[in-house]
Image (cartoon, helix red, strand yellow):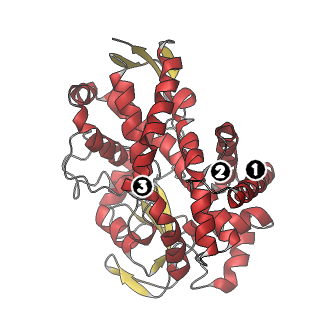
Amino acid sequence: MTAGFDPAQPGFGANPWPAYARLRAAPGLPLWNGFRLAARFADVRAIASDRRMVRGTALFAPEIRRQMQAAENFHDMPFHERFVQTSMLELDGPDHDRLRRAVFPFFTKTRLESLRSFVTGWVDAALDRLVARGRFDFIADLAAHLPGQVIGHLIGTDPALAPQMTRWSEDTVSYFDVSRRTAERKAQAEGAVRLFHDALLDLHAARQAQPRDDLMTAMIGAKNAGLLSHDELIATIMQILHAGHGSTIDVMGGGLHALLAHPDQMARLRADPGLMPTAVQEMFRFAPPLIFFHRYAGEDLSICGQAWPKGAKFGLLYASANRDPEAFPDPDRFDVARRPNLHLAFGAGPHVCLGNNLARLNMEILFARLLARTRAIELAGPVPWKTGLQAHGPLSLPITIATH
């Protein structure tokens, strides 16, 4: 049952796990706000992996897309509609696969290893400033800046533009939250996409004149080869920032909070830095940053033991799936050495997270350097959490540190 399931209530973000446990125990896929909620690991994985399940309505109901946009106040935003609402994340089928193939070579683990020295250098420079202070907000002072710098470096933008791109991303993505669709936020989202578009046009022109080893240059090559259009190039680069910025900040905050709440596991990780890859995977499982994604039934179908009509809406609760005792022994225990750990924080199926290797690289370097340069880390104040189903993570994380 979904009675009492209220992700907007103030305390939900800090402790959503009892609510998820009740949903997992409910029969079938409970109905909530028009969505059939999948809370169990097996159900979430089955729906996410099934190609008959789609993100957008274009493949099965293109005639009602405009009406749905108007009903949800998701219309009259020419730049947002052109470059965000029709990005790779919102596409399905051949178009989605084509765009993913065009950008995938830049996100392999081998290719991203070339970023290791840049990320390490940036983290060390940031810690040089912060360690001497002894106390700082891990979110505002550190985590909030790293993803934008790394993605900007990957794209090829000026490092000085990273803070501005981060704000554009936040203004753009926030409008996906239905509860925040005010006229003011609508104008902010549309304006942010327009400004980002203009900045990328300038970068596009610069790289056409002088190619470099960056994503913009690679995407121009893909466009020239006929793999994608100019608008798709701009939309895809925007999406890479939108998808990789906020979620990485949230999981960094959730990961450090988990270590602080489990000092035995932090001590274990300090004693054995070789556990960092499994520790990062456990951070993603234990406190996934993206907790809810939707799917539509693209045709009449049967799944999760029931028949569904075309157009049925499903809500996939990744955070709940990652705490399912049917999939993970002792799922509420944080274990930096957990193996196997086949979590769903990155999704599954055609829309599995393209940037998962980049997110893990950032996390492994950040926590390795933070632990190496400190003797102790302690919580220094209350930790407010995001509410709703848009994202999961601390809004702030004040800490004190002691050095060697």
Up the image or down, 374 lies above or below 37; here it is above
**Percent x, y of residue 224:** 64, 74
Image quarter for residue 25?
bottom left
Residues at marks 2 and 1 touching, judged by CB atoms closer than 8 Å: yes
Dot 3, crowdedness within 10 Å: few (<14), some or many (≥20)? Answer: few
Q: Quadrant of the C terminus?
A: top left
Mark closest to the chain's N terminus, 2 or 1: 2
Q: Which mark is residue 174?
A: 2
Asked whether residue 382 appears in the rendered view, the answer is no
The type of residue carrying mark 3 is Arg
Image quarter for residue 305?
bottom left
Dot 1, crowdedness within 10 Å: few (<14), some or many (≥20)? Answer: some
Marks 2/3: CA–CA distance: 31 Å
The type of residue carrying mark 1 is Arg
Q: Which mark is residue 25?
A: none
Marks 2/1: CA–CA distance: 8 Å
Residue highlighted by disc 3: 111
Asked whether residue 285 appears in the rendered view, the answer is yes
Marks 1/3: CA–CA distance: 37 Å
Dot 2, crowdedness within 10 Å: few (<14), some or many (≥20)? Answer: some
Which is in the foreground here, disc 1 or disc 3? 3
Mark closest to the chain's N terminus, 2 or 3: 3
**Percent x, y of residue 323:** 30, 51
Which residue is painted at 71% across and 55% down in the image?
Answer: 200
Mark closest to the chain's N terminus, 1 or 3: 3
The type of residue carrying mark 2 is Ser
Left or right of 53 on screen, residue 261: left
Residue highlighted by disc 1: 185
Which residue is painted at 64% across and 66% down in the image?
Answer: 233
Left or right of 377 on screen, residue 390: right
Circle 2 SS class? helix
